[in-house]
Image (cartoon, helix red, strand yellow):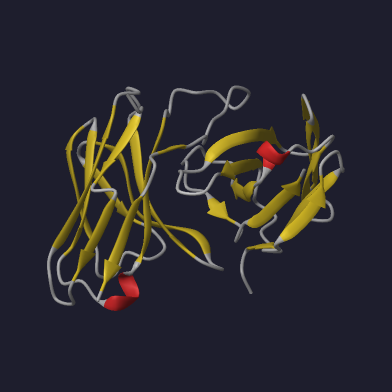
Amino acid sequence: QKEVEQDPGPLSVPEGAIVSLNCTYSNSAFQYFMWYRQYSRKGPELLMYTYSSGNKEDGRFTAQVDKSSKYISLFIRDSQPSDSATYLCAMTGSSNTGKLIFGQGTTLQVKP
Amino acid sequence: DADVTQTPRNRITKTGKRIMLECSQTKGHDRMYWYRQDPGLGLRLIYYSFDVKDINKGEISDGYSVSRQAQAKFSLSLESAIPNQTALYFCATSDSRQGTSSGANVLTFGAGSRLTVL
């Protein structure tokens, strides 16, 4: 069993829809949770960063962490065609090592 | 110019050949990493370096070696390439001085090097 599980999709939604992307994990030591967005033929870029549990909002994006359920989510409101990309969750433990464990990535397509 | 630059961007080679992928950064970060990305498997850590004299194996280091020539340069070598090393390779950097509230463990990635081993 992988430490981090993420449904690879693909996920296709109409423009303006609310998108929910999720990851589950098995290691209770994970403390830092990130979402990266990767456009085709590009490297991943950081979208959201959360330490421990709770919610974090940035514009149309909301990240949620539920450590009791070992479950993290990324919500995208009013989705746009420019949001079409692969979304990767990533996480790591309490030590500041920078060694991230990634999910498989979910491919999202937002249709005009 | 890109903060993290990888060369080459694309490479096709044959089984048994030696290949080097290079990475340079202008962010002034002390930590550098090599990941590979495969469909359905996400990104997996190959090697990482916390400073010029520090080299550590990651999750999948067999068949690879690295060299940290300077703080800004980190190269990945495949001594004798094999077809299952066909993948997209990413170099990344991070700054150990960042605190937890501002993004400790945040990685900045290069654009990737696509390697095909025939």
Question: Which residue appears at 70% of the width and 55% of the height?
Answer: A28
In this rendering, position of residue B90 left or right of residue A106: left
Dividing the image into 4 quarters, which one contains the C terminus of chain A?
top right
Give the image quarter of residue B74: top left
* Residue placed most toward the observer, B32 or B38: B38
Above or below — where is A6 with respect to A96?
A: below
Give the image quarter of residue A70: bottom right
Say if residue B93 shows up in the picture: yes
In this rendering, position of residue A26 left or right of residue B58: right
Q: Residue furthest right?
A: A17
In this rendering, position of residue A45 left or right of residue B92: right
Q: Residue furthest front?
A: A112
Above or below — where is B96 with respect to A98?
A: above
Say if residue A71 shows up in the picture: no
The tally of labels here is 0
Question: Which residue appears at 17% of the width and 74% of the height?
Answer: B14
Dividing the image into 4 quarters, which one contains the N terminus of chain A?
bottom right
Above or below — where is B15 with respect to A110?
A: below
Residue A2 rendering spot, x and y as whole percentages? 61, 69
Residue B41 rendering spot, x and y as whole percentages? 53, 67
Question: Which residue appears at 71% of the width and 40% of the height?
Answer: A81
* Residue placed most toward the observer, B65 or A83: A83
Question: Which residue appears at 51% of the width and 49% of the height?
Answer: A40
Residue B91 rendering spot, x and y as whole percentages? 35, 45
